[in-house]
Amino acid sequence: MLYKAVILIGGPQKGTRFRPLSLEFPKPLFPVAGFPIIHHHIEACSKVPDLLEILVIGFYQPSEALNRFLTSSQRESNINIRYLQEYTSLGTAGGLYHFRDQILSGQPDGFFVFNGDLCCKFPLAEMLEFHNQRTNGQHFTLLATEAPKSQSLNYGCLVKDPETHEVLHYVEKPQTFVSSIINCGLYLFTPEIFEHISTVFKENQAEIFNGDSFSSNRDTIRLEQDIFSPLAGTGKLFVYNCEDLMWSQIKSAGSAIYANRLYLGLYHDTHPERLAKNDENGPHIVGDVFIHATARVDATATLGPNVTIGAGVIIGPGVRVRESIILEGASLQDHCCILHSIVGWNSVVGAWSRVEGTPKGPNPNDKFAKMDSDNLFDDHGKLTPSITILGSNVSIPAEVIILNAIILPDKEIRGTFKNQILL
């Protein structure tokens, strides 16, 4: 059987909680565990037998960075990869429908659809096996996992038949508790899905023609609200439920740090060669650490756990880095300390300075707890303590403290700052 894969990456008007990291760089290309976010999607797809091609759909303008990434990914995976640009934001189903001819070319038997900001182990082989065990042949499968009752309201919730695994009821971000089973944003569709999307599209166009709607976004069709909710209970929609799936969305800088931790942990099984090891001539490694081959790290530095060091990074003597991402070209000078932070491209942290954020992660006492994407400000208008972010080309002087702060690109800091956004 032949399959394709579609990765939905949205566009520049999204990802506002990811700023300032997304100001100059498309969020889907932000490096997590040493590689762009959607690299992990593509890598998982490359292990699916008989995969015809991978289509990346979004409304980012084609750029040198995006083209370079797709070209290198195609070469490494040996799978054809194409970028299809929407003329505007069409929604999770609208983009699929707009490019349906490209998706169906080559007559695939089915296709995976990924949300571009999800992070997990991607159980594609298991989903395929589960999908092919269904009997009607014209059905759709979504990946789900468990969440605590309080957190489930933040996601798409579904009720399933315990024996057949059919989805009986689906509600996106319900107002009251529906179920602890949540949608993970990964689907396996057959071509028949376009018949259901077409029905919604025609209804939307009829509303415009009849003057019932003056909305400018009637081309937007959402898989979750417009497709899954009506399909529930019709015998067409099934759920592959992984209760203990390590899963997260990458909505904010704090969630990027958590995703970095998850992917580094997965490398033990998938790519152990990517994890740094202790040796006599290298830095002291604690836990899971990724160091790019071009980075220069002093042997007296201590890195980890859960640290990613990007290309061309320079780390001086006595530096301590923990639970952080250090992006390409950054320089960490002697004896500085980086904790729960993201240091931007080509930024410099001076000697003996301390850059620290507030740790973010799921409740360790609940095995089903998910990473919360907190609002930037609390109810009183104050900055919510979270991961510290240094934008690109930020310069931090020696012997200062930067705590729970967000610093926009191209800033030269003069002193200590805490709990502030520096514009």
Image (cartoon, rainbow, N blue to C red):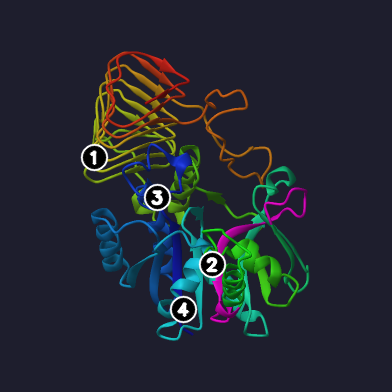
Magenta span includes 118: no
Q: Rate crowding at label 1 as few (under 14), some (14 to 19) or many (20 or more) other CA atoms within 10 Å.
A: some
Measured in 3D between alpha carbons, the distance from the residue under mark 1 to the one under mark 4, in whole angstroms, is: 38 Å
Kind of residue at disc 1: Ala
Magenta span includes 182: yes
Q: Measuring 62% from the left and 85% from the top, which residue is drawn there? A: 137
Mark 4 or mark 1, which is nearer the start of the sequence? 4
SS category of the residue bearing label 2: helix
Report the front residue among 221 and 57: 221
Q: Rate crowding at label 4 as few (under 14), some (14 to 19) or many (20 or more) other CA atoms within 10 Å.
A: many
In the rendered view, tell whether residue 240 sits above or below residue 173. below
Measured in 3D between alpha carbons, the distance from the residue under mark 2 to the one under mark 1, in whole angstroms, is: 41 Å
Mark 4 or mark 2, which is nearer the start of the sequence? 4
Read off the residue under disc 2.
93
Count of numbered circles in the view:
4
Q: Work out whether residue 123 can be spotted.
A: no
Quadrant position of the C terminus in the picture:
top left
SS category of the residue bearing label 3: loop
Read off the residue under disc 3.
12
In the rendered view, tell whether residue 4 sits above or below residue 247. below
SS category of the residue bearing label 1: loop
Measured in 3D between alpha carbons, the distance from the residue under mark 2 to the one under mark 4, in whole angstroms, is: 18 Å
Read off the residue under disc 1.
295
Q: Measuring 68% from the left and 49% from the top, which residue is drawn there? A: 147
The numbered disc on residue 3 is: 4
Q: In this view, does 223 lie to the left or right of 423?
A: right
Kind of residue at disc 4: Tyr
SS category of the residue bearing label 4: strand
Mark 1 or mark 3, which is nearer the start of the sequence? 3
Kind of residue at disc 3: Pro
Instruction: Estimate the x, y position of residue 161 in percent, counting from the top left.
Output: 78, 69
Q: In this view, does 175 lie to the left or right of 145?
A: right
